[in-house]
Image: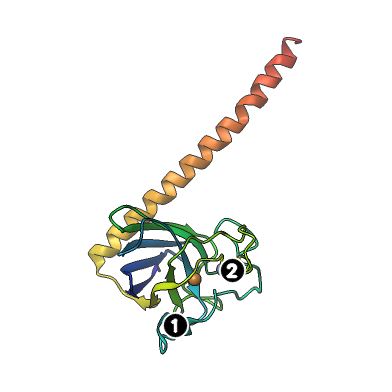
Amino acid sequence: MSLFAVAVLTGIVTGTIHFIQESPTSPVIVRGEVKGLTKGLHGFHVHQSGDMTNGCTSMGSHYNPYGKNHGGPSDTERHVGDLGNIIAGADGIARVDITDDLLSLSGKYSILGRGLIVHADPDDLGRGGEHDSLTTGHAGARVGCGIILETTVKPSLEKRLMDTLAQIQKEKKMKKEKEAMSEKKPLDALDWASVIGI
Ligand SMILES: [Cu+2]
Ligand SMILES: [Zn+2]
């Protein structure tokens, strides 16, 4: 059974982000839109807590159940909450479309009830050499945030989301096959060369 969650972001920026997970072991798809941003990159993370008593400030640091350093979404050394950057165009809108293998909407390390935060500045993915690169990615102020809440969706929307999910997985598979093919080619050429003795 698929799991769904949503976070409505409020603050200097606003937005709605949906989370979809087909099964507890599937990757989580993170999709939506954030409006009112300055053009460019903005750090985007799941933070420890969904507590908005003191706005985005009370949501704590990046969600980090494994006690790792801050990193980028494709690094092995990363916080679970490290989703990298979202990119806003000149219109101030960032269209979010992330597939993440580490996030989960169930189990011990579920992100349900935690905070989703958008930052003023780019996340340096731990590589910037700043005093806070390995904790926050030097992403600056919290310009918008929301609590990740489990939800149900209308059957028509569920169908659309699952179709999108299937499409994403198909594209991923095709990309992998393409990569495997291009890796294979030089080997074939090498074998041929040895066959004809050059
Ligand atoms: Cu953050
Ligand atoms: Zn982090």
Is residue 174 depicted above or below 195 in this figure?
below
Q: Is mark 2 within 8 Å of ligand 2?
A: yes
Residue 140 in picture, x, y percent from top left: 49, 69
Image quarter of residue 78:
bottom right
Q: Nearer the viewer, residue 36 or 51?
A: 36
Picture mark count? 2
Disc marking residue 50? 1
Q: Quadrant of ligand 2?
A: bottom right
Q: Residues within 10 Å of mark 2 (few under 14, many from 20)?
A: many
The quadrant of the image that shows the C terminus is: top right
Residue 186 in picture, x, y percent from top left: 64, 25
Is residue 50 depicted above or below 97 in this figure?
below
| Residue type, numbered disc 1 | Gly
| Residue type, numbered disc 2 | His
Q: Residue at x 47, y 59 (%)?
A: 85
Q: Earlier in the sequence, mark 2 or mark 1?
A: 1
Q: Nearer the viewer, residue 76 or 47?
A: 47
Q: Nearer the viewer, residue 56 or 191?
A: 56
Q: Residue at x 53, y 76 (%)?
A: 107
In the image, is 19 to the left or to the right of 126? Answer: left
Q: Which residue is mark 2?
A: 79
Q: Residues within 10 Å of mark 1 (few under 14, many from 20)?
A: many
The quadrant of the image that shows the N terminus is: bottom left
Residue 31 in picture, x, y percent from top left: 36, 61
Residue 197 in picture, x, y percent from top left: 76, 10
In the image, is 179 to the left or to the right of 93? Answer: right
The kind of secondary structure element at disc 2 is loop
